[in-house]
Amino acid sequence: MTAVNLLDFDLDGLADFCAQLGEKRFRAVQLMRWIHQRGEADFERMSDLAKSLRGKLAGVAEVRALPVISEQRSADGTVKWLFDVGAGNAVEAVFIPEDDRGTLCVSSQAGCAVGCRFCSTGHQGFSRNLTTGEILAQLWFAEHSLRRAGAGRGGPDPRVITNVVMMGMGEPLQNYAALLPALRVMLDDHAYGLSRRRLTVSTSGVVPMMDRLRDELPVALAVSLHAPDDALRDQLVPINRKYPLAELLAACQRYLERAPRDFITFEYCMLDGVNDTPAHARALLALVSAQGPVGRVPCKFNLIPFNPFPKSGLRRSSAERVQAFAQILIDGGVVTTLRKTRGDDIDAACGQLAGEVQDRTRVHERLVRMPLPAAARSRPDAIGGGHEGG
Ligand code: SF4
């Protein structure tokens, strides 16, 4: 019998599991704290759990870490992990440290079905949804391995990761059932205790699920826009054919009624000669203005440098082009940021490393033993161990 992975549960799920073992809800709180706050995976070390419960758990449950295929550290502090999710598939998580925060970019699917033109992950096609446990295992591993490496910021709060963006590989809203409990754990004060403002879901525009997220767990929202009109967006972000811009923007306005922030972040990947002209910038301003298809949409733009990858046929916009584009948006009164390229010395385009892993021969080439959290090391099968622009 396969042991139940406790990383698959939010607090209610953990409480249900404890109830099946004849245990009270407060045991679920204890377990949550041990696993997520303290990074413990060995039930024997959970010292305030009754011995009888530890015994019960040992037979039926585990905290199942994802094997780590590789860990790359950039000179600027960025860390990128490649996790093995089986059957030749791998997913990436990236930690980006800044002065006032530590952000982890997390994957939600192996591959992606949306197929954005500029995205390495999209070019690989879709393999499968990650489970809740596989989504959370990325955060669990990153937080606790960074802590052990001394990446904390001092003070009483030991947390290294202060922000999570669901912006790695995959379209999170096409894996909603697994995503929701994972978000709950990220927000739970017994686990990672993130605020809803510091937890961002990035979507290519799955309109019905944007509405569900709004109703069920409104966290910060980023939308991969990448084009100011339907004709171009149909080509760059194919889901636009199903949910065109007017529907998407209307969903953004509905979302804002409950969002923890009073704006939507629009991601815009700058592609040389494709979507980066002054005319595109002016069209973008018009799109979100009071004269746009749904009226004014409170927003900010995040301009992203394109990460070239083989066979994309696309080029990164020049710095001058990006500056000129940004200036038009800023002059139009919309807050606009340029995403810094981080970890350039370790980085292939998001999703590119995972794409290589799909070639099984290369899996074996890449598979190296990496340190795991102390408790996870005891597991016999433990080998050490994007939503590109979206
Ligand atoms: S940008 Fe995001 S939604 Fe589009 S293909 Fe890549 S991972 Fe999927």
Image (cartoon, grey):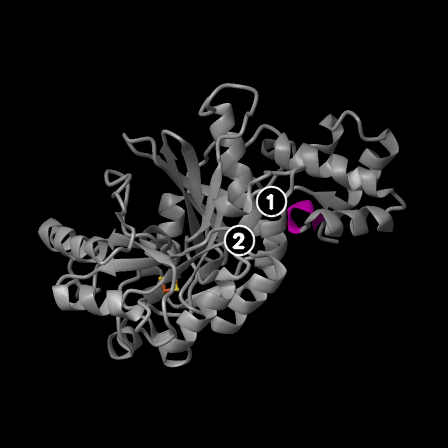
In space, the residues marked 2 and 1 are separated at their CA atoms by 10 Å
Q: Mark 2 = which residue?
A: 219
SS class, disc 2: loop
Q: Is residue 260 left or right of residue 386?
A: right
In front here: 249 or 173?
249
Determine the residue positioned at 19% across, 61% down: 271
Mark 1: amino acid: Leu
> Where, quadrant-wise, is the N terminus in this rendering?
bottom right
Task: Using the image, determine if residue 77 lies above or below residue 220.
Answer: above
In front here: 291 or 110?
291
Q: Quadrant of ligand 1?
A: bottom left
**In terms of image quadrants, where is residue 61?**
top right
What range of the chain is rendered magenta? Answer: 4-8
SS class, disc 1: helix
Task: Using the image, determine if residue 60 lies above or below residue 246.
Answer: above
Mark 2: amino acid: Val
